[in-house]
């Protein structure tokens, strides 16, 4: 069935049936606006838009995978501030000739992700579009600590900690560009495609690090670009120990095949959605313990300095300047 045959109200009804009921005290789909009970520490809000042909292609990703990723990249922003996702608003622009099953798949994937992260779809909007699908997702969350953890706030001497692995999402993108499709031809390709198509949000790590970190963010536009946000204010800089970058073997092998440097992918690739935190030395042992208890892998990759600029430290201790302008640019 086509969207135009079902109509807006019929489409909204189907979307509604795919979602879990809202928690007690919340008002979701079905009224003029959503209602969320008051939060002791205020609310966090973030929004992200995915445009067909720009952020996704249907020969690369299935509708349910797109719905899951759309939620994940927004939840990651809430988690990066030490928050807990609670509610979701979404708007969809879709042409009338699109199959209803495509939209149902998107919202089925969103429902699965929202259930995983403990949030609820509260409402949104659907409009007719001419070409392609545009999906906009807004996530509302509560700070997990007394106040949100900001990007700014790092101090000289803070240790830089990063969760998971870096560069794998970019490696997955290269595989897609080379014609490899999900689930890949072997375990290594599946691992890299998963990093690109289905990023893992570090909810437990965010809650663990929030009470300890001076600054925190998620790595969406590349490690160096996010570090530049850390050191933008206050005349400070950062050093990164290149040999400590958490790059997995699958990423290293593909980089070698591509005659590229895996470290470059870790620095500039983006879309890893791992957490980057600046932790004072006095809280470092506690941060390690908390991440171990949460069963989250991590690496200590460097330090905040009182010298401006971002520099990579090679194994022979030689330094090289890292270019913060090379991160992902939506308008490039």
Image (spheres, rainbow, N blue to C red):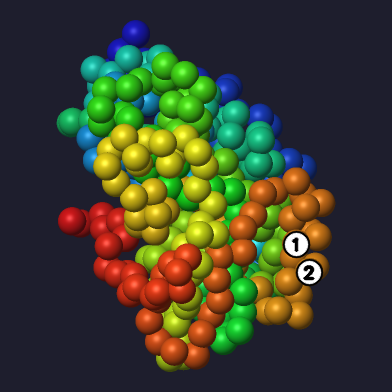
Per the image, the residue denoted by label 2 is 285
Where residue 31 sits in the image (x, y, percent)? 56, 40
Crowding at label 2, few (<14), some or many (≥20) Cα neighbours within 10 Å? few
Q: Secondary structure at mark 2?
A: helix
Camera-side residue: 203 or 84?
203
Per the image, the residue denoted by label 1 is 288
- Res. 207 visible in picture: yes
Drawn side of residue 24 relative to residue 147, left or right: right
Against 154, residue 193 (above or below) is: above
Against 170, residue 305 (above or below) is: below
- Res. 81 visible in picture: no
Q: What residue is shown at x 77% (from left), y 42% (from top)?
A: 24
Q: What residue is shown at x 34% (from left), y 40% (from top)?
A: 256
User: Residue reaching furthest top?
Assistant: 1
Q: Quadrant of the N terminus?
A: top left
Q: Secondary structure at mark 1?
A: helix
Q: Are marks 1 and 2 in contact (CB under 8 Å)?
A: yes
Q: What residue is shown at x 50% (from left), y 59% (from top)?
A: 243
Q: Where is residue 82, by image quadrant?
A: bottom right
The numbered dot on residue 91 is none
Q: What residue is shown at x 33% (from left), y 74% (from top)?
A: 321
């Amino acid at each position: 069935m086509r969207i135009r045959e079902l109509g807006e109200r019929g489409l909204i009804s189907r979307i509604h049936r795919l979602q879990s009921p809202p928690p007690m005290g919340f008002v979701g789909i079905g009224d003029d606006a959503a209602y969320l009970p008051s939060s002791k520490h205020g609310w966090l809000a973030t929004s992200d838009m995915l445009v067909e042909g720009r952020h996704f292609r249907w020969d690369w990703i299935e509708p349910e995978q797109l719905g899951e990723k759309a939620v994940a990249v927004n939840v990651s922003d809430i988690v990066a501030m030490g928050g807990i996702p609670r509610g979701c608003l979404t708007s969809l622009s879709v042409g009338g000739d699109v199959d209803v099953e495509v939209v149902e798949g998107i919202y089925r994937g969103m429902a699965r992700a929202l259930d995983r992260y403990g949030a609820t779809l509260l409402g949104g909007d659907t409009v007719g579009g001419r070409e392609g699908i545009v999906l906009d997702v807004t996530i509302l969350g509560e700070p997990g600590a007394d106040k949100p953890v900001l990007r700014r706030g790092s101090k000289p001497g803070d240790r830089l900690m990063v969760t998971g692995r870096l560069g794998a999402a970019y490696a997955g993108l290269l595989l897609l560009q080379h014609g490899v499709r999900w689930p890949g031809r072997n375990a290594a390709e599946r691992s890299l495609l998963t990093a690109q198509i289905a990023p893992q949000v570090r909810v437990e790590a965010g809650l663990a690090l929030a009470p300890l970190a001076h600054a925190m963010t998620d790595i969406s536009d590349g490690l160096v670009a996010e570090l530049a946000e850390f050191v933008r204010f206050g005349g400070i800089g950062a050093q990164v120990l290149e040999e400590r970058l958490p790059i997995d073997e699958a990423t290293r092998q593909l980089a070698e095949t591509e005659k590229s440097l895996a470290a470059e992918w870790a620095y500039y690739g983006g879309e890893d959605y791992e957490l980057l935190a600046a932790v004072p030395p006095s809280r470092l042992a506690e941060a390690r313990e908390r991440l171990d208890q949460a069963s989250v892998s991590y690496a200590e990759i460097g330090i905040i300095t009182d010298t401006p600029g971002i520099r990579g430290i090679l194994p022979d201790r030689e330094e090289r300047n890292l270019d913060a302008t090379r991160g992902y640019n939506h308008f490039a």
